Image: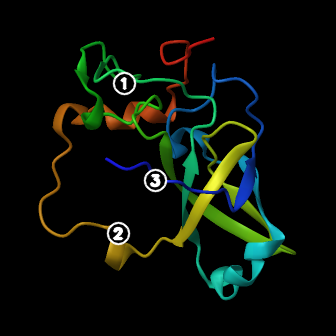
Amino acid sequence: MDPIKYSAIGIIRTPYRSRERTPVQPSGARGVLGRVEVDEAFRDGLKDLEGFSHLILLYHFHRSEGFELTVKPFLDQAVHGLFSTRAPRRPNAIGLSVVGLLSINEGVLIVEGVDMLDGTPLLDIKPFVPEFDAPQGEVRTGWLEGKAGKAREARADKRFSKD
Protein backbone atom coordinates (compact mmCIF):
# COMPACT_ATOMS: atom_id res chain seq x y z
CA MET A 1 0.00 0.00 0.00
CA ASP A 2 1.05 3.58 -0.58
CA PRO A 3 2.08 5.50 2.54
CA ILE A 4 -0.40 8.00 3.97
CA LYS A 5 0.91 11.22 5.45
CA TYR A 6 -0.75 13.28 8.18
CA SER A 7 0.34 16.50 9.83
CA ALA A 8 -0.49 17.51 13.38
CA ILE A 9 -3.02 20.31 13.83
CA GLY A 10 -1.99 20.92 17.42
CA ILE A 11 -0.58 19.39 20.55
CA ILE A 12 -2.17 17.81 23.61
CA ARG A 13 -0.84 18.81 27.03
CA THR A 14 -1.44 16.47 29.96
CA PRO A 15 0.07 15.79 33.38
CA TYR A 16 1.51 12.48 32.13
CA ARG A 17 5.22 12.59 31.22
CA SER A 18 5.87 8.85 31.40
CA ARG A 19 3.90 5.92 29.99
CA GLU A 20 3.98 4.19 33.33
CA ARG A 21 1.03 5.06 35.58
CA THR A 22 -0.87 6.77 32.76
CA PRO A 23 -4.57 5.77 32.64
CA VAL A 24 -5.24 3.20 29.92
CA GLN A 25 -8.61 4.72 28.93
CA PRO A 26 -10.39 8.07 29.48
CA SER A 27 -12.68 6.41 32.06
CA GLY A 28 -9.58 6.06 34.25
CA ALA A 29 -8.81 9.77 33.88
CA ARG A 30 -12.04 11.25 35.23
CA GLY A 31 -11.32 14.68 36.59
CA VAL A 32 -7.88 14.84 34.95
CA LEU A 33 -7.57 18.07 32.98
CA GLY A 34 -5.60 18.65 29.82
CA ARG A 35 -5.07 21.35 27.23
CA VAL A 36 -5.50 20.91 23.52
CA GLU A 37 -3.44 23.64 21.85
CA VAL A 38 -4.67 24.03 18.28
CA ASP A 39 -2.21 25.52 15.82
CA GLU A 40 -3.21 29.02 14.74
CA ALA A 41 -3.64 27.91 11.11
CA PHE A 42 -6.53 25.63 12.17
CA ARG A 43 -8.29 27.77 14.80
CA ASP A 44 -11.09 28.92 12.50
CA GLY A 45 -12.16 25.27 12.48
CA LEU A 46 -13.08 25.57 16.17
CA LYS A 47 -16.07 27.82 15.35
CA ASP A 48 -19.25 26.50 17.03
CA LEU A 49 -17.41 23.73 18.90
CA GLU A 50 -18.20 25.28 22.30
CA GLY A 51 -21.78 23.98 22.04
CA PHE A 52 -20.62 20.37 22.44
CA SER A 53 -20.00 18.72 25.81
CA HIS A 54 -17.67 15.99 24.51
CA LEU A 55 -15.10 15.63 21.76
CA ILE A 56 -13.41 12.78 19.97
CA LEU A 57 -9.68 13.44 19.79
CA LEU A 58 -7.65 11.56 17.20
CA TYR A 59 -3.94 11.65 17.86
CA HIS A 60 -0.59 10.10 17.08
CA PHE A 61 1.01 7.76 19.64
CA HIS A 62 4.26 9.69 19.24
CA ARG A 63 6.27 7.50 21.60
CA SER A 64 5.08 4.20 20.19
CA GLU A 65 7.50 2.10 18.18
CA GLY A 66 6.75 -1.07 16.29
CA PHE A 67 3.88 -3.43 16.96
CA GLU A 68 3.02 -7.07 17.51
CA LEU A 69 -0.13 -8.67 16.13
CA THR A 70 -0.83 -10.52 19.38
CA VAL A 71 -0.59 -8.78 22.74
CA LYS A 72 -1.42 -9.21 26.40
CA PRO A 73 -3.56 -6.10 27.05
CA PHE A 74 -3.73 -4.13 30.28
CA LEU A 75 -7.16 -5.51 31.23
CA ASP A 76 -6.48 -9.24 30.78
CA GLN A 77 -3.79 -11.85 31.31
CA ALA A 78 -4.56 -13.73 28.08
CA VAL A 79 -3.00 -12.97 24.70
CA HIS A 80 -5.39 -11.42 22.15
CA GLY A 81 -5.18 -10.21 18.58
CA LEU A 82 -3.99 -6.60 18.44
CA PHE A 83 -7.11 -5.39 16.66
CA SER A 84 -9.35 -6.71 19.46
CA THR A 85 -7.48 -4.45 21.90
CA ARG A 86 -6.69 -0.78 22.36
CA ALA A 87 -2.97 -1.39 22.83
CA PRO A 88 -0.92 1.68 21.83
CA ARG A 89 1.70 -0.10 19.69
CA ARG A 90 -0.11 -0.45 16.37
CA PRO A 91 0.78 -0.58 12.65
CA ASN A 92 -0.56 2.99 12.39
CA ALA A 93 0.01 4.62 15.76
CA ILE A 94 -3.36 6.37 15.92
CA GLY A 95 -5.13 6.92 19.23
CA LEU A 96 -8.71 7.92 19.94
CA SER A 97 -10.17 9.33 23.14
CA VAL A 98 -13.55 10.82 24.01
CA VAL A 99 -12.99 13.75 26.38
CA GLY A 100 -15.21 16.33 28.04
CA LEU A 101 -14.95 19.88 26.71
CA LEU A 102 -14.85 22.48 29.49
CA SER A 103 -13.85 25.64 27.64
CA ILE A 104 -12.23 27.15 24.57
CA ASN A 105 -10.11 30.29 24.66
CA GLU A 106 -7.88 31.56 21.85
CA GLY A 107 -7.35 28.17 20.28
CA VAL A 108 -6.82 26.31 23.56
CA LEU A 109 -9.37 23.72 24.60
CA ILE A 110 -9.55 22.73 28.26
CA VAL A 111 -10.66 19.12 28.35
CA GLU A 112 -11.33 16.52 31.02
CA GLY A 113 -10.51 12.82 30.90
CA VAL A 114 -7.09 12.88 29.22
CA ASP A 115 -5.36 9.51 28.99
CA MET A 116 -2.51 10.40 26.65
CA LEU A 117 1.06 11.53 27.21
CA ASP A 118 2.06 15.17 27.38
CA GLY A 119 3.13 16.47 23.98
CA THR A 120 0.91 14.11 21.99
CA PRO A 121 0.41 15.39 18.41
CA LEU A 122 -3.25 16.09 17.65
CA LEU A 123 -4.48 14.82 14.26
CA ASP A 124 -8.16 15.75 14.35
CA ILE A 125 -11.10 16.81 16.52
CA LYS A 126 -14.67 15.65 16.02
CA PRO A 127 -17.74 16.45 18.12
CA PHE A 128 -19.14 13.48 20.02
CA VAL A 129 -22.82 13.06 19.11
CA PRO A 130 -24.58 10.12 20.83
CA GLU A 131 -27.03 9.69 17.96
CA PHE A 132 -24.09 9.28 15.56
CA ASP A 133 -21.52 7.60 17.77
CA ALA A 134 -23.53 5.23 19.98
CA PRO A 135 -24.27 2.04 18.03
CA GLN A 136 -27.84 0.86 17.61
CA GLY A 137 -29.00 -2.58 18.70
CA GLU A 138 -27.11 -5.15 20.73
CA VAL A 139 -23.54 -4.25 21.65
CA ARG A 140 -21.06 -7.06 22.27
CA THR A 141 -17.67 -6.39 23.85
CA GLY A 142 -15.94 -9.70 23.15
CA TRP A 143 -13.22 -10.71 25.59
CA LEU A 144 -13.71 -7.39 27.44
CA GLU A 145 -17.15 -8.45 28.67
CA GLY A 146 -17.13 -7.81 32.42
CA LYS A 147 -13.60 -6.34 32.33
CA ALA A 148 -14.09 -2.89 30.79
CA GLY A 149 -15.04 -1.40 34.16
CA LYS A 150 -11.54 -2.20 35.40
CA ALA A 151 -10.19 0.52 33.08
CA ARG A 152 -11.07 3.12 35.74
CA GLU A 153 -8.29 1.78 37.97
CA ALA A 154 -5.91 0.35 35.35
CA ARG A 155 -2.65 2.19 34.71
CA ALA A 156 -0.05 1.62 32.04
CA ASP A 157 3.10 -0.32 32.81
CA LYS A 158 6.11 -1.19 30.65
CA ARG A 159 4.45 -3.88 28.54
CA PHE A 160 4.10 -1.66 25.44
CA SER A 161 7.27 0.36 25.97
CA LYS A 162 10.40 0.02 23.89
CA ASP A 163 12.51 2.12 26.29
- Could you say which is closer to the camera, residue 11 or residue 24? 11
Q: Give me the C-alpha separation between circle 3 and circle 2.
A: 25 Å
Residue linked to disc 1: 75
Identify which residue is drawn at 66% across, 67% down.
101
**Apparent side of residue 60 relative to residue 110 in the rendered image (left or right):** left
Callout 2 environment at 10 Å: few (<14), some (14 to 19), or many (20+)?
Answer: few
Work out which quarter of the rendered image holds the C terminus and state it. top right
Residue 141: x, y in percent?
Answer: 21, 43
**Apparent side of residue 42 relative to residue 75 in the rendered image (left or right):** right
Of the two numbered discs 3 and 2 on the same chain, state the one appearing first in sequence.
Answer: 3
Residue linked to disc 2: 133
Of the two numbered discs 3 and 1 on the same chain, state the one appearing first in sequence.
Answer: 3
Of the two numbered discs 2 and 1 on the same chain, state the one appearing first in sequence.
Answer: 1
Disc 1, SS: loop
Residue 72: x, y in percent?
Answer: 33, 16
Residue linked to disc 3: 4
Q: Give me the C-alpha separation between circle 2 and circle 1.
A: 24 Å
Q: What residue type is labelled 1?
A: Leu
Q: Which amino acid does label 2 sit on?
A: Asp
Q: What residue type is labelled 3?
A: Ile
Residue 57 position (above or below residue 92): below
Residue 110 position (above or below residue 46): above
Disc 2, SS: helix
Q: Give me the C-alpha separation between circle 3 and circle 1.
A: 31 Å
**Apparent side of residue 58 relative to residue 44 in the rendered image (left or right):** left
